[in-house]
Amino acid sequence: MADQQQDEAGVDATSPNPLQRRNSLEKHLQTRPDEQDLKNRHILLDTTAAPALQAKQAELERQRITDNLKKGLANRPEKSALVEKNVLPDSNAAPALQEKQKDLERNMRADTLDKALQHRPEREALIDKNILPDSTAAPALQEKQKELEKHMRADSLDKALQSRPDREKLVDEGILKDGE
């Protein structure tokens, strides 16, 4: 008889024991998601509108989103503007190769900088060419030191000008000729 209740597909068509059926239903009811969970998963609509209006409300929401998207796309900057602002990379390489290209450029800049630093002149050479100031003073005092040296040169020049011989004395000593 049990063989007769199984159909040809091999499915048992006998009704389960009522106690087993009730236990199975209770188990499913305990794990049943609540209303808020179904709304969060977008299975139920989260609305207070009447069911007849829910479809229209969903359609209006889709239309609003579409309009906002079209407006955003219309105001979208051109690719060249994004490249100028460094938002997009300025590269014709395939996207899969752009990261490698960026790494290569970074390594090339590092190599160029290393070479420039290797050929950099020593501090003494820069001081000899008056590119760097010759100072053993602390950096906070270097400006005052420059100012003091400037005043000392001005004072020295004033002294030299005061003791400068006049034209007649230079002619008498034979340094200048009378007609000069």
Image (cartoon, grey):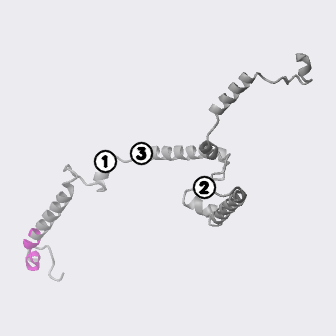
Residue, disc 2? 90
The image shows residue 10 at horizontal and vertical percentages of 88, 22
- On the rendered structure, is 64 left or right of 139? right
Tell me how far mark 3 sits from mark 2, CA to CA: 28 Å
Q: Foreground mark, 3 or 2? A: 2
Q: What residue type is labelled 1?
A: Arg
Report the magenta residues as a range: 159-170
Q: Is the magenta stretch mostly helix, strand or loop?
A: helix
Badge 3 crowding class, 10 Å Cα cut-off, few under 14, some 14 to 19, many 20 or more, is few
Residue drawn at (91%, 24%) of the image:
7
Query: Element under label 1?
Result: helix
- On the rendered structure, is 67 left or right of 111? right
In primary-sequence order, the first of circles 3 and 2 is 2
The image shows residue 130 at horizontal and vertical percentages of 29, 56
In primary-sequence order, the first of circles 3 and 1 is 3
Q: What residue type is labelled 2?
A: Asp
Residue closer to the observer: 78 or 40: 40
Tell me how far mark 3 sits from mark 1, CA to CA: 13 Å
Residue closer to the observer: 158 or 29: 29
Badge 2 crowding class, 10 Å Cα cut-off, few under 14, some 14 to 19, many 20 or more, is few
Tell me how far mark 1 sits from mark 2, CA to CA: 39 Å
Q: What residue type is labelled 3?
A: Leu
Badge 1 crowding class, 10 Å Cα cut-off, few under 14, some 14 to 19, many 20 or more, is few
Residue, disc 1? 123
Residue, disc 3? 117
The image shows residue 158 at horizontal and vertical percentages of 11, 70
Residue 139's disc is none
Residue closer to the observer: 172 or 10: 10
- On the rendered structure, is 13 left or right of 166? right
The answer to whether mark 1 and mark 2 are in CB contact below 8 A is no
